[in-house]
Image: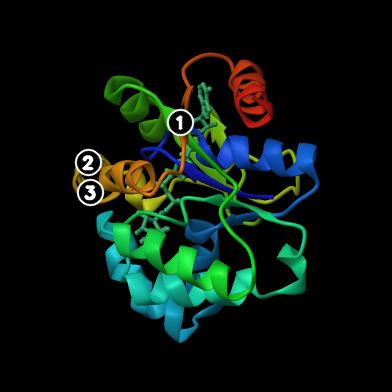
Amino acid sequence: MIIVLLGPPGAGKGTQADRLAARLGIPKIATGDVLRAALRDGTKRGREAKAYMDRGDLVPDSVILGILQDVMTSPATAKGAILDGAVRTVPQAEGLGIMLAEIGKKVDRILLFDVDDDELVKRLSTRTVCEGCQTPYMGRDPGSKCEKCGGKLVRRKDDEPEAIRNRLEVYRTQTAPVIDWYGDNKMKVLKIDADGPVDEVTARAIEALNG
Ligand code: AP5
């Protein structure tokens, strides 16, 4: 099953993608994580993406479609994938659809995580993430240890106030139209109330996927 997760920055896409991946036994593919890993490894792709990411802008569609081509043709995604934040523009949605059709696959479900702006800003401005495995935490100071891998928790550069504002604006102008694009193409977008305890949001997502 190929599941696309949509939603604004801080909606909990990464948090829920990990849980859904464990529950469904398919990998999570987060383009943000792929880009940050490329940045750490000093690859051309990472260097190209850095300035866009630091400002909270989207990296060019060509870079994202290159990543999606690599991952969706890899044996690791043979049984499906949870695509976390991997579709953020209409050209990316179109490109993914074409690339999947070429290998006899399609997007099976689309989940939209919905949270109001005040809660998003609160989550992002208090988030730390593991430098190693990227697990996000709330209410843990930078420098603390990751529960999963022992890595160091750090603040993301794009969680500074100006970058957060820009990311929310970019979401409204460039990513929100993807919701209508899927609707126009007869693909149902399942809206999940993503406010509330993490376990409850997971339960709502599972219910929507099974419905
Ligand atoms: P990316 O890393 O994907 O960032 P994002 O989309 O801004 O999303 P976030 O990771 O900030 O939020 P999230 O929804 O995953 O929430 P999380 O689970 O962490 O992308 C970074 C950058 O890469 C982009 O800005 C862009 O430059 C580039 N990029 C990536 N993909 C791209 C693409 N396709 N096209 C172009 N550019 C691309 O949760 C947030 C916080 O809230 C955490 O602290 C978490 O613990 C907490 N939390 C989660 N759920 C709850 C809950 N229910 N209640 C309370 N707290 C919660």
Return the x and y of residue 8 as percentages of the image width and height.
36, 38
Q: Is mark 1 within 8 Å of ligand 1?
A: yes
Q: Which residue is mark 2?
A: 172
Q: Horizontally, is 47 left or right of 106 in the view?
A: left
Q: Relative to residue 46, is residue 178 drawn left or right? A: left
The structure residue drawn at horizontal position 62% and vertical position 41%, both measured from the top left corner, is: 17
Ligand 1 shows up in the quarter that is top left
How many residues crowd mark 2 within 10 Å: few (<14), some (14–19), many (20+)?
few
Q: Is residue 23 above or below residue 91?
A: above
- Looking at numbered disc 1 in the image, what kind of residue is underneath it? Phe
First-in-chain label (1 vs 3): 1
- Neighbourhood count class around disc 3 (C-alpha, 10 Å): few under 14, some 14–19, many 20 upward: some
Answer yes or no: disc 3 within 8 Å of ligand 1: yes
Task: Assess whether mark 2 and mark 3 are in contact (beta carbons under 8 angstroms).
Answer: yes
Q: CA distance from mark 3 to mark 2?
A: 5 Å
Q: Quadrant of residue 60?
A: bottom left
- Tell me what residue is drawn at x 28 percent, y 54 percent: 56
| Mark 2 residue element | helix
Secondary structure at badge 3 equals helix
Q: CA distance from mark 2 to mark 1?
A: 14 Å
Q: Secondary structure at mark 1?
A: strand
Kindly give the residue lying farthest to the bottom in the view shown. 44
Label 1 sits on residue: 113
Between 125 and 5, the residue placed more toward the observer is 5
Is residue 86 something that shows in the picture?
yes
Read off the residue under disc 3. 170
